[in-house]
């Protein structure tokens, strides 16, 4: 196993691990403060959270030995990627507080292959209904069969069902942990953790041996949202931490969907609210594939040996993103598509467009899906759409990592 993260990023990551307890005291489980703290420089982080341990933290940085850290990682069989390496997931660079280092199990090439496929993040409550467990398992299985990389958090309940479904479908699930990648949590999922390590990959932003803390769960959620082009909430109460993942995804401009739950069920109150606010309705893997690739995925692309594969000209290298077409190559539109396109302004919802076009929401969504597939509109938040400008999508383009910072003497 070769560790590729640079010395500066390894040191920054080690500092976050060193200050984990202080971060717990400062952040608690408040996700809205994550970006303001985890995105700080080393000295800013020490000043913000170290308190009486500030001198100890500075001494830790001075004494940190990146060579020794790499030897430990190699012995544990863990790989690393930092923001300055080509192996770092480019989808995470959209995060203002992107992890300085991503630790992972398995080989770098295997992780790269997982992230080269379309990526869907499936999450939900730790105490789901039987219905939600069945749906989570089937979504994980069917998406894996279709060649989609399925991401979840290896928690009890929905997460575990998603991973089991992906494995049952012959897929290679990706689990994001709130502690180090060598610290399975919860311990009751150890057998499932072993299967995911063998069949897929486990990733984390925390160094090896780090136990999960209260703040690291919402921090983990932002990584899951960052990895996925689509985040689906299978079932969630109004107070579920699962909704944090959906919020992060919406802030990143990624697609958000939810599985409809019983209208009188408190277990589904949070996920049903997402639907009311405009999240895509996910009743099956076909609905999820429509969100990833555009309406009519099966009819447009067919099912090959490896599942659904979009045409090469639709691939950007950023899983699930469609390549916008240039104005010069704008495709011919039928009258309905032209009418809907002419009505799209910045951030318009499906309901607003449907009302102005005199269409049902379902027909408007299908038309917008075709326009999105052509690269003429792009998603904004849960249900907003905007026209692409000058042949460039309103979705943030892929970002390149900055150059590696100089190592300390």
Image (cartoon, grey):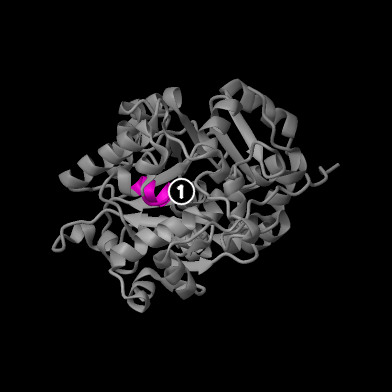
Residue, x 27% and y 45% (percent of image)?
284
Q: Which residue is mark 1?
A: 213
Q: Decide whether the magenta segment is chiefly helix, strand or loop.
A: helix
* Image quarter hosting the N terminus: top right
**x, y (%) of residue 159?**
33, 42
The range drawn in magenta is: 288-295
Residue 118 percent across, percent down from the top left: 48, 41
- Residue 326, above or below 227: below
Relative to 236, is 6 on the left or the right?
A: right
**Relative horizontal placement of residue 149, taking residue 36 as reference (left or right):** left
In the image, is residue 207 above or below residue 123?
above
User: Does residue 304 appear left or right of residue 203 in this picture?
Assistant: left
Nearer-the-camera pick, 321 or 367: 367
Farthest residue to the right: give it. Answer: 409
- Answer with the quarter of the image where residue 161 lies: top left
Residue 383 seen by the camera: no
**Count of numbered badges drawn on the protein:** 1
Q: Is residue 289 magenta?
A: yes
Residue 248 seen from this side: yes
Classify 27 as above or below 294: below
The quadrant of the rendering that contains the C terminus is top right
Q: Position of residue 123 (x, y in %)?
A: 35, 48
Residue at image coords 37%, 78%: 356
For the residue carrying disc 1, how many other residues have a C-alpha within 10 Å: few (<14), some (14-19), or many (20+)? some
Q: Residue furthest bottom?
A: 356
Q: Quadrant of residue 107?
A: top right
Q: Residue at x 68, y 29 (%)?
A: 70
Residue 114 at x, y = what percent?
51, 33
Helix, strand or loop for disc 1: loop
């Amino acid at each position: 196993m070769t560790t590729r993260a640079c010395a500066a990023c390894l040191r920054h990551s080690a500092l976050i691990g060193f200050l984990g307890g202080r971060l717990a005291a400062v952040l608690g489980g408040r996700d809205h403060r994550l970006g303001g703290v985890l995105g700080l420089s080393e000295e800013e982080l020490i000043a913000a959270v170290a308190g009486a341990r500030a001198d100890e933290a500075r001494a830790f940085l001075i004494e940190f030995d990146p060579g020794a850290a790499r030897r430990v990682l190699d012995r544990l069989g863990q790989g690393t990627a930092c923001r300055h390496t080509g192996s770092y997931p480019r989808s995470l660079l959209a995060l203002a507080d992107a992890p300085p280092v991503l630790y992972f199990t398995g080989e770098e090439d295997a992780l790269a292959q997982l992230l080269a496929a379309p990526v869907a993040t499936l999450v939900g409550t730790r105490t789901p209904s039987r219905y939600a467990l069945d749906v989570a398992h089937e979504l994980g299985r069917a998406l894996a069969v279709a060649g989609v990389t399925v991401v979840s958090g290896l928690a009890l309940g929905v997460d575990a069902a998603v991973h089991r479904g992906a494995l049952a479908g012959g897929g290679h699930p990706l689990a994001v942990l709130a502690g180090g990648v060598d610290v399975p949590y919860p311990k009751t999922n150890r057998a499932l953790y072993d299967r995911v390590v063998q069949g897929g990959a486990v990733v984390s932003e925390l160094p090896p041996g780090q136990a999960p803390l209260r703040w690291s769960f919402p921090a983990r959620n932002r990584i899951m949202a960052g990895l996925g082009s689509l985040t689906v909430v299978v079932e969630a109460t109004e107070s579920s931490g699962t909704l944090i993942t959906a919020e992060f995804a919406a802030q990143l401009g990624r697609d958000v969907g939810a599985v409809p739950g019983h209208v009188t069920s408190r277990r589904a109150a949070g996920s049903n609210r997402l639907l009311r606010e405009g999240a895509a309705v996910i009743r099956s893997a076909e609905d999820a594939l429509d969100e990833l690739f555009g309406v009519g995925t099966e009819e447009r692309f067919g099912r090959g040996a490896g599942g659904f594969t979009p045409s090469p000209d639709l691939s950007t290298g950023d899983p699930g993103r469609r390549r916008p077409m240039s104005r010069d190559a704008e495709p011919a539109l039928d009258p309905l598509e032209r009418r809907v396109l002419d009505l799209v302004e910045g951030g318009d919802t499906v309901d607003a467009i449907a009302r102005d076009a005199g269409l049902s929401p379902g027909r408007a969504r299908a038309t917008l899906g075709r326009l999105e597939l052509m690269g003429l509109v792009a998603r904004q938040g849960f249900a907003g759409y905007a026209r692409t400008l000058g042949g460039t999508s309103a979705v943030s383009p892929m970002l390149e990592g900055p150059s590696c910072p100089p190592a300390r003497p």
